[in-house]
Amino acid sequence: MKIMTTVKRVTDPDQKINISDDGTRVETEGDEYVMNQMDEWGTEEAIQVKEDHGGEVVVASVGPQEATKEIRKGIAMGGDRGVLVETDDQLDSDAVARVLAEVAKNEEPDLIFLGKLALDTDRNQTGQLLASYLDWPQATFAHSVTVEDNSVLVEREIDGGEDTKRLQTPAVITAIERLNDPRYASLPGIMQAKQKPLDETTPEELGVDTTPKVEGVQYELPPEKEAGEIVENVDELVDKLQDDANVI
């Protein structure tokens, strides 16, 4: 079985961010990048499927040359090889999905795992768009995956409960936190990852026009929270909630 998992290079979410003076971009006080946390869940699940059923895990990313670091991390966790589609452009979800669709057509995987969304854009679109472009079945927000002969049983979170789907492979699955606990890359794994193959290409070589369909116009920080107020007793609290906050 061949499994493809995607990883995205994102700004470290622990860094403090600011908005540029013209409001067109997000700036960070540091310059640290990490693998998108939710992609770690997808990568871990891909590796577990390989360990249980055999096969190969291909770790793919769309981004700058520096994203090879995140690909190598996925390989160090247990992946077999990597694919980087190199671009310095800021692609929207649709362009990323079309690029990944071409990678998938070349690789012909049985399953594709993605994180449910990327922490830097929070769009939750790429997995669904990818499945649509490939015309494959999909299951989003997966918290349990059971691979069978020619199908996969996926338990997933939905609004107000859970849902179970059986998909014929090939299929696309997006992962949530409940799916697994990602392993740490071991030192031997890190050393071996440096020797494993990593193919590089570009959107142009794949024949994909990455002109964005969605344009980011302006960023704004959320308003600062006002300081709380200390009250002397319950009666005063009730008065505040009723007269000032209008919540009772």
Image (tube, helix red, strand yellow):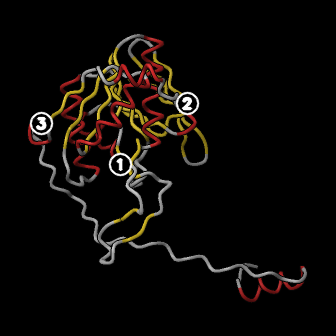
Residue topped by disc 3 = 206
Q: Along the line of sight, which residue is nearer the eye, 74 or 2? A: 74
Q: Mark 3 or 1, which is nearer the eye?
A: 3
- Residue type pointed to by label 1: Gln
For label 2, the crowd category at 10 Å Cα-Cα, with few meaning under 14, some 14 to 19 and many 20 or more, is some
Q: Is residue 116 above or below residue 32?
A: above
Which secondary structure, mark 1?
A: loop
Whichever of labels 2 and 1 marks the residue nearer the N terminus, that label is: 1
Q: Mark 2 or 1, which is nearer the eye?
A: 2
Q: Is residue 206 above or below residue 228?
A: above
Whichever of labels 3 and 1 marks the residue nearer the N terminus, that label is: 1
Which secondary structure, mark 2?
A: loop
The numbered dot on residue 125 is: 1
Q: Is any atom of residue 214 visible in this view?
A: yes
Compared across the picture, whether 115 is left or right of 212 comes to right
Residue topped by disc 2 = 180
In the picture as drawn, the residue positioned furthest to the bottom comes out as: 243
- Residue type pointed to by label 3: Leu
Which secondary structure, mark 3?
A: helix
- Residue type pointed to by label 2: Asn
Tell me where residue 213 appears, x and y as whole percent.
Answer: 21, 58
Quarter the N terminus occupies: top left
Q: Quadrant of residue 189?
A: top left
The numbered dot on residue 91 is: none
Q: Is any atom of residue 169 visible in this view?
A: no
User: In the image, what residue occupies the spot 61% across and 42% down?
Assistant: 161
Quarter the C terminus occupies: bottom right
Q: Confirm or deny contact between disc 2 and disc 3 (CB under 8 A).
A: no
Compared across the picture, whether 159 is left or right of 236 comes to left
